[in-house]
Structures are given as structure tokens and as C-alpha cells.
Image: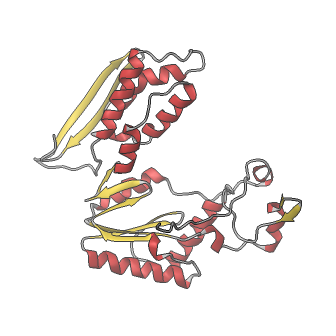
């Protein structure tokens, strides 16, 4: 029988105590949607991604900060000496330290979200050299790099949960298959969960809000959960829309680009969305 590699990650449930004693932090995380737009604008042919291995645990906690992270396990008190998982400021601190290291090392053009980094270019060689430079900078700064976390160079790659190809973002196939296999919800909570999954990809679906309107209707607090023909139709339609979702790319100009305006009327007013179709798209 083949062996299975099992990896463990130490975590603590910080929902009950840490937030109460944690002051706010002024530093801001980059907006993920803005990162998507910026990567689209590059219209790259090749990509490579670098995902830091256990990034939080490579960042030591100052001795004076450790008491606030104390916890008790089976009658024995412990505390963290490294940046803990699930603490609300861990992503911000990690992002800032990696960003500072890359800036100090004069890293080539890249995008970063916490410990996820992507580089791009017009050839595999160009992307490979950029990736090696960034890895070298991170290693010199004391961050570990796991070879299995480095992907590419490749013409198609996944970054921040999105599949990228030729400067366009697409829904990953495993996500499409997962949504297509979902069974109809049986209560409000399950309906909200389904809408949360498909809602992340709403920008790929023309008239998304109109299609899922019957589903939102049954989740309202004032309404009883009643799964009728309208809900069944909306549920099946949005799954099919996800299966056939279009890829998204930067706004283009030229004689081969066709602008398409989608409009629809609703009880509370009209909705519209403007799309582009490039040559060869239907």
C-alpha cells in the first residue's frame, strides 16, 4: 500500500480571548481584487508562484508580547514564541515582513499577498530567473522555501485560488466540479453556504444577481424556507452558468473586440452589465 504524507499544523482557537486584548493595527493588507486587476493588465504568457512554507512560524514573537498568547492545555500553561496561526494580525505582520525583505533585496516585478508570490513574463527563462531571484532574497532574509510550494514556469497556473492563463482569470476546474456536484439545499443555512461558494465567482456570470434572486429570497429572516420551482430552476441554472463561465481579462480596444450590454428588469429596478467579446469568442 502506498504511503501517504501527512502534514500537521499547530493552531490555537483564538476566537474567545485574543481578540479582546488585541489592539487595532493601522497597516493594511492589499486588496485581492486589485491584485487580480493588476495581474490581468500584464497579459503575461508565463507564470511562476512561490508559497512560503509555514511563514508565520518563521517569525519570532518579541519576549514582551508572549504572555498575551498564553494558553492552558491539559493543566499545563504554554505560550507561543512564534507568530501564531489564526491570530488576526498574523497575516498583516507576515505580509509586511516579506514585503520589506523583497523591497530591500530589490526583487524583480511581482505581486504578493501574505506569503503567496507570483512573477510573470513572456518566456519561461525570464520567469525562471525572476523566481530564482525572489527565492534567493527570501532565503537570505531567513524565510524557508519548500520546493513543492514553487510552481512553474508554466503558461497556466493557480494563484490566490484562481486559474491564470494568457493574462485571463478562470474558475479552476476542481471548483467547477465541486459546484456542479452540489445537492439542493434543505434549509436557509445550506442555501447561504451555497450562495457563498458561487458568489465568489459572480463576476464571471452575466446577470448573476437576477439568476440567484429566488435563492436569496428564501434566506431572508422574514421568510420561511420554501424550496419551490423558482428555487430549483435558479439552483440548476447558476450551476450551469458556473460550468460554462467565461474567463475574464483586461479591457481591450480594436476592431475585433465586441462590447455587449446585458440588461434585465426587476421589481426593484433595472440591472445592467457591460461585457467584451474578443475575436473567436461566442
Q: State the image coordinates of residue 53 (x, y, percent, origin top left).
A: 55, 71
Most foreground residue, 80 or 182 = 182
Depth order, front residue of 265/79: 79
Q: Nearer the viewer, residue 10 or 168?
A: 10
Vertical order, 188 against 242 (above or below): above
Identified at 35% across, 55% down, the residue is 163
Q: Residue at x 51, y 77 (%)?
A: 145
Q: Is residue 186 left or right of residue 247?
A: right
Q: Is residue 45 above or below residue 24?
A: below
On screen, residue 180 above or below 222: below
Residue at 75% across, 71% down: 81
44 sits left or right of 214 in the view: left
**Is residue 106 among what the camera can see?**
no
Which quadrant is home to the C terminus? top left
Count of picture labels: 0
Q: Against 277, is 237 above or below?
A: above
Residue 148 x %, y %:
45, 72
- Say left or right for 113 vs 40: right
Residue 120 visible? The answer is yes
- In the image, farthest residue toward the left: 255
Which residue in the rendered view is the most extreme toward the front? Answer: 1
Q: Residue at x 12, y 47 (%)?
A: 280
Coloration of the structure image: secondary structure
Find residue 43 and report its image quarter.
bottom left
Whole-percent x and y of residue 116?
48, 65
The x, y position of residue 104, in whole percent, is 52, 80
Amino acid at each position: 500500500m502506498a504511503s501517504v504524507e501527512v502534514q500537521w499544523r499547530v493552531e490555537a482557537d483564538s476566537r474567545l480571548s485574543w481578540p479582546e486584548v488585541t489592539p487595532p493595527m493601522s497597516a493594511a493588507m492589499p486588496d485581492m481584487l486589485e491584485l487580480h486587476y493588476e495581474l490581468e493588465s500584464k497579459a503575461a504568457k508565463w507564470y511562476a508562484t512561490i508559497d512560503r512554507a509555514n511563514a508565520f512560524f518563521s517569525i519570532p514573537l518579541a519576549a514582551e508580547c508572549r504572555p498575551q498568547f498564553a494558553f492552558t492545555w491539559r493543566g499545563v500553561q504554554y505560550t507561543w514564541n512564534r507568530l501564531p496561526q489564526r491570530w488576526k494580525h498574523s497575516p498583516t505582520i507576515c505580509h509586511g515582513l516579506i514585503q520589506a525583505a523583497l523591497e530591500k533585496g530589490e526583487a524583480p516585478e511581482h505581486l504578493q499577498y501574505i506569503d503567496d508570490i507570483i512573477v510573470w513574463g513572456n518566456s519561461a527563462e525570464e520567469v525562471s530567473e525572476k523566481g530564482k531571484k525572489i527565492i534567493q532574497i527570501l532565503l537570505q532574509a531567513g524565510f524557508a522555501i519548500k520546493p513543492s510550494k514553487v510552481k512553474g514556469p508554466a503558461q497556466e497556473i493557480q494563484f490566490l485560488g484562481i486559474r491564470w492563463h494568457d493574462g485571463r482569470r478562470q474558475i479552476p476546474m476542481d471548483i467547477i466540479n465541486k459546484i456542479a456536484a452540489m445537492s439542493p439545499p434543505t434549509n436557509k443555512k445550506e442555501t447561504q453556504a451555497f450562495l457563498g461558494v458561487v458568489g465568489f465567482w459572480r463576476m464571471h456570470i452575466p446577470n448573476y444577481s437576477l439568476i440567484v434572486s429566488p435563492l436569496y429570497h428564501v434566506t431572508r429572516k422574514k421568510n420561511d424556507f420554501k424550496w419551490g420551482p423558482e428555487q430549483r430552476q435558479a439552483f440548476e441554472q447558476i450551476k450551469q452558468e458556473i460550468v460554462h463561465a467565461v474567463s475574464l481579462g483586461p479591457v481591450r480596444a480594436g476592431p475585433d473586440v465586441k462590447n455587449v450590454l446585458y440588461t434585465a428588469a426587476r421589481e426593484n429596478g433595472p440591472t445592467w452589465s457591460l461585457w467584451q467579446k474578443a475575436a473567436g469568442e461566442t
